[in-house]
Image (tube, rainbow, N blue to C red):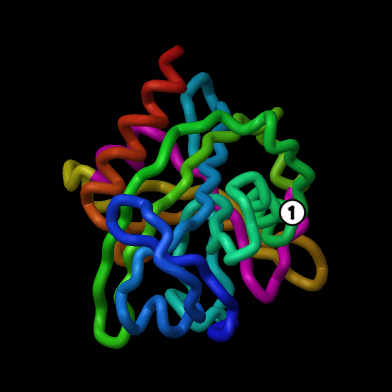
Amino acid sequence: METEKLRVYDEHGNPQGIETRQAVHEQGLWHETFHCWMVGRRNNRDTVYLQLRSEAKKDFPGLFDITAAGHLLADETVEDGVREVKEELGLEVDFDKLILLGMVKDQMEIPGFIDNERCHCFLYPMPNNNDLRFELQLEEVSGMGEVDFEALADLFAGKEEEVEIDGFIATLDGHSPFKKRIGLKEIVPHSSSYLEKIIYLIRQELNK
């Protein structure tokens, strides 16, 4: 995976060439990603689905994250990013059914890892709340959870320390349900500006 070729950009989105994924994160080069936030309804409230990353993942194993997301390879278009939904979650989603939220920058730096992303963000309203729809790629995703949207917004804004998440862990025998409370330390880190903007954009669509 570290040898995957990604197209790199300057901060303004001007193409600068192609580099390996490893070089991109070592040097903090700007690159593009695909983010798909899936939403549903439960008890007359809007909800958001979060994936639980596999413990086998190199980066941020065992943490909750965006419903489906991934890097856009050098030879891919934004439309090709929808493959992440099929690969990770086993869902056939037509790109035309996605709601464009826009491009949102996300920057993060931890020791040995600098991430400067231009994220092409989309919203997908789930047809229903049937968790059995998911057929997870266990090497990538070990479970799915559902949280109240406004509660998640308060968590991201620092107004709450924890949020209740209801979901399942995928097992060889099927699904093992869970319900617990999680804080930001159980969620893959994203910049505060990204979280603020994505909540704003999702809320705009949900209120239409």
Residue 195 image position (x, y, % from top left): 30, 46
Residue 74 image position (x, y, % from top left): 58, 66
Residue 23 versus residue 138 in the image, above or below: below
Residue 196 versus residue 182 in the image, above or below: above
| Residue 78 magenta | no
Closest to the observer: 93 or 130? 93
Closest to the observer: 197 or 13? 13
Closest to the observer: 199 or 81? 81
* Amino acid type of the residue tagged 1 in the rendering: Lys
| Residue 143 magenta | yes
Quadrant assignment for the C terminus:
top left
The image quadrant of residue 73 is bottom right
Residue furthest right in the image:
173
Residue 187 in view, yes or no: no
What residue do we see at 46% from left, 61% from top?
Answer: 64
The image quadrant of residue 139 is bottom right
Quadrant assignment for the N terminus:
bottom right
The residue stretch that appears in magenta? 134-156
Residue 203 in view, yes or no: yes
Residue at numbered disc 1:
86
Residue 98 versus residue 175 in the image, above or below: above
Closest to the observer: 76 or 186? 76
What residue do we see at 75% from left, 47% from top?
Answer: 91
What residue do we see at 48% from left, 27% from top?
Answer: 46
What residue do we see at 43% from left, 36% from top?
Answer: 102
